[in-house]
Image (cartoon, rainbow, N blue to C red):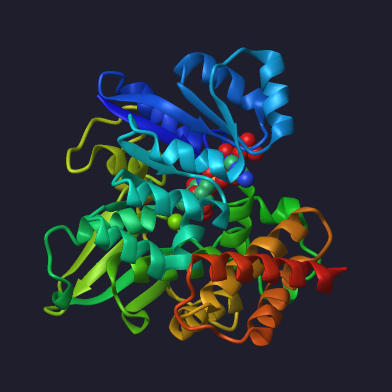
Amino acid sequence: MKQVSLLGATGSIGIQTLDVLRLHPDQFSLYAMGFGRNVEKALPLIQEFKPSLIVVQDEETKRKLEKEMAHPQILCGGEGLIEASVAEPVDVVVNAVMGSIGLPATLKAIQSKKQIAIANKETLVTAGHLVMEEAKKHNVDLLPVDSEHSAIFQALNGEQRKDINKLIITASGGSFRDQTREELVGVTVDDALNHPNWKMGAKITIDSASMMNKGLEVIEAHWLFDVPYDQIHVILHRESVIHSMVEYVDRNVIAQLGTPDMKVPIQYALTFPERKELPITKNLNLEEIATLNFQKMDMDRFPCLRMAFEAGKAGGSMPTVLNAANEEAVQQFLEGKISFLDIEKYIEQALEKHDRIHNPDLSTIISIDKETRERVRFQIN
Ligand code: NDP
Ligand code: MG
């Protein structure tokens, strides 16, 4: 029986992780559960899964939860997330919180030699060099939850890095894939949240519409698979059936296909190297889909993807700035304070103003993250 610690349990990935755990009660037990502030959503989950440890975002949420139920161990904030990641009984940490807030918990889980299923891509974008260095040092595998990275991980199975010609990451194109840049002026939050293929949390849905999600995934792939940026290729594939591919030096291309349903990569990250049945997900019906389309990515149409490649190649502290400026700008867009096209503008400004720091340590990353968010907020006001 594996004891699971699930960070971000009330989110889109969190809820789907619990759907997977429910299928295998003899294999997995929920030891710890972390969430932000959504007590209403968390309560029935706590009653059902009975975790020994609960972590919430702040004291106020803790008081709210305690009014509803008695529980011997409720912790708060970043320290709580770390405790849930290192607790002795925990075997697997599923990191599904949103944003760079998940970084310290990932690092501590690695140092405690926990198996890690990583959905929290901002962790790898903001500090990929630190995360991978620790993972190597402690001999810990990071099992990807992101569907593209799960696809690459499966397509790479047993192959040698020297034989890879390129990684081909597919992009659905997000909510605005058929709009021109001119047509993006004045689009609303609701328009942006209307993703054609995937049902996800608000932040990643906006990132998909701006194509920053694909940019973050390029950086994530660079770190997870140790492949240089000029060997990472992005292609538009509207059906989201091929989740990504690996091209080898001998021109063989291995692709992974599947129904666009996050429960598939979530379960694979949890059961690897085994495969288990997943009856709650539909089979892939290729006859119904009939056609698969592919299109070249236009970097002028999607400047966020261009900026992510540039920040990734520049390295050092640039990806930290890219990620923090994006997190802040997306939040401001969701709150109705800036327009959709302003998101890329504030990211570009943040990158231009930043003096790159080579090989930043954890405390430098945390302070650059904080300063970048403050700078974006300051410019918006
Ligand atoms: P959601 O916004 O749906 O969920 C985020 C979760 O994190 C919620 O449980 C939220 O709690 C919790 N949370 C947020 N801030 C804090 C905090 N300060 N302390 C503790 N918990 C916090 O996001 P998603 O599930 O969509 O995405 C999660 C991660 O997975 C992201 O990094 C995303 O990029 C990645 N991902 C998501 C995919 C998807 O299909 N959704 C696909 C691939 C990757 P609460 O709501 O209670 O406040
Ligand atoms: Mg993805």
Q: Provide residue 71's location: percent of width, then percent of height.
A: 57, 16
Residue at the image point whose x is 81% and y is 65% from the top: 338
Left or right: where does residue 39 sit relative to residue 112? right
Q: Provide residue 197's location: percent of width, then percent of height.
A: 51, 50
Residue at the image point whose x is 45% and y is 34% from the top: 16
Left or right: where does residue 214 sit relative to residue 70? left
Q: Which is nearer the eye, 348 or 248?
A: 348
Of all residues, the one furthest to the right in this rendering is 381
Quarter for ligand 2?
Answer: bottom left
Q: Quadrant of residue 346?
A: bottom right
Q: Is residue 120 visible?
A: yes
Q: Which is nearer the eye, 288 or 314?
A: 314
Q: Provide residue 227's location: percent of width, then percent of height.
A: 29, 75
For the C terminus, the quadrant is bottom right
For the N terminus, the quadrant is top left
Q: Is residue 199 visible?
A: no
Is 349 placed above or below 363 here? below
